[in-house]
């Protein structure tokens, strides 16, 4: 069988318009890691089950291992953790994770904090149930989740106090 022709795509990546030529089967995760050297999002399961690959697509968290890069449109806005590095809310979340001891091996954390960020954008003062629900797509094999949930609650409280 002949090799399929690469597809030209254009979209917004961390606030900048980018272009790429991609194989039809290339995932968004592979694209950002290999062609744009954005390696925060990780491949855990590669099947949409672990959330280690979570990025924001048009302000919604998605499993980038399931999204085909070729389906990206010029109006699509992809934000990886790197694109949030200077965001005060993300900095607050990351500090709270560290303060609460919510990071062990760290493999799940890039995806986890993107979900935390999305939660606190949608629900600045989340209930415990909302914290659980918004992280339900992110698996962590180390922490047992309690410290992660405490960290998210702490970040919400700090934000409310203007810290
Ligand atoms: S690597 Fe994408 S959900 Fe696990
Ligand atoms: S800290 Fe190890 S998987 Fe979450």
Image (tube, rainbow, N blue to C red):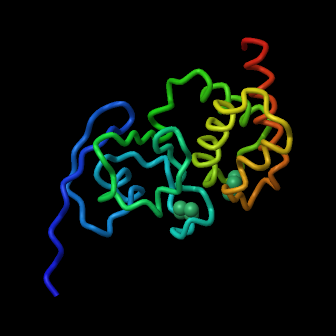
The residue located at (33%, 57%) in the rendering is 71
The residue located at (19%, 56%) in the rendering is 21
Q: Quadrant for residue 69, please give it.
A: bottom left
Q: Relative to 98, is 26 on the left or the right?
A: left
Work out whether 110 lies above or below 153. Answer: below
Q: Relative to 9, is 110 on the left or the right?
A: right
Q: Which of 65 and 110 is in front in this view?
A: 65
Q: Determine the residue located farthest toward the top in the rendered image.
A: 162
Q: Quadrant for residue 60, please give it.
A: top right
Q: Quadrant for residue 120, please give it.
A: top right
Q: In which quarter of the image is the N terminus?
A: bottom left
Q: Determine the residue located farthest toward the bottom in the rendered image.
A: 1
Q: Which of 44 and 13 is in front in this view?
A: 13
Q: Relative to 153, is 42 on the left or the right?
A: left
Please provide percent x and percent y for residue 119. Answer: 68, 37
All told, the count of numbered labels is 0
Please provide percent x and percent y for residue 101. Answer: 78, 40
The residue located at (50%, 39%) in the rendering is 81
The residue located at (60%, 57%) in the rendering is 51
Work out whether 142 lies above or below 127. Answer: below
Q: Which of 8 and 116 is in front in this view?
A: 8
């Amino acid at each position: 069988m002949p090799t399929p022709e690469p597809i030209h795509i254009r979209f917004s990546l961390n606030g900048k318009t980018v272009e790429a030529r991609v194989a039809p089967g290339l995932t968004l995760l592979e694209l950002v890691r290999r062609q744009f050297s954005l390696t925060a999002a990780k491949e855990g399961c590669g099947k949409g089950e672990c959330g280690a690959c979570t990025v924001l697509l048009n302000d919604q968290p998605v499993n980038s291992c399931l999204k085909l890069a070729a389906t990206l449109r010029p109006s699509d806005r992809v934000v990886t953790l790197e694109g949030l590095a200077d965001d005060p809310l993300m900095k607050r979340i990351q500090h709270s994770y560290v303060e609460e001891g919510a990071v062990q091996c760290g493999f799940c954390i890039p995806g986890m904090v993107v979900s935390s960020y999305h939660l606190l954008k949608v629900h600045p003062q989340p209930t415990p149930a909302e914290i659980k629900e918004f992280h339900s797509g992110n698996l962590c094999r180390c922490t047992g989740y309690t410290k992660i949930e405490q960290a998210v609650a702490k970040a919400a409280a700090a934000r409310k106090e203007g810290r």
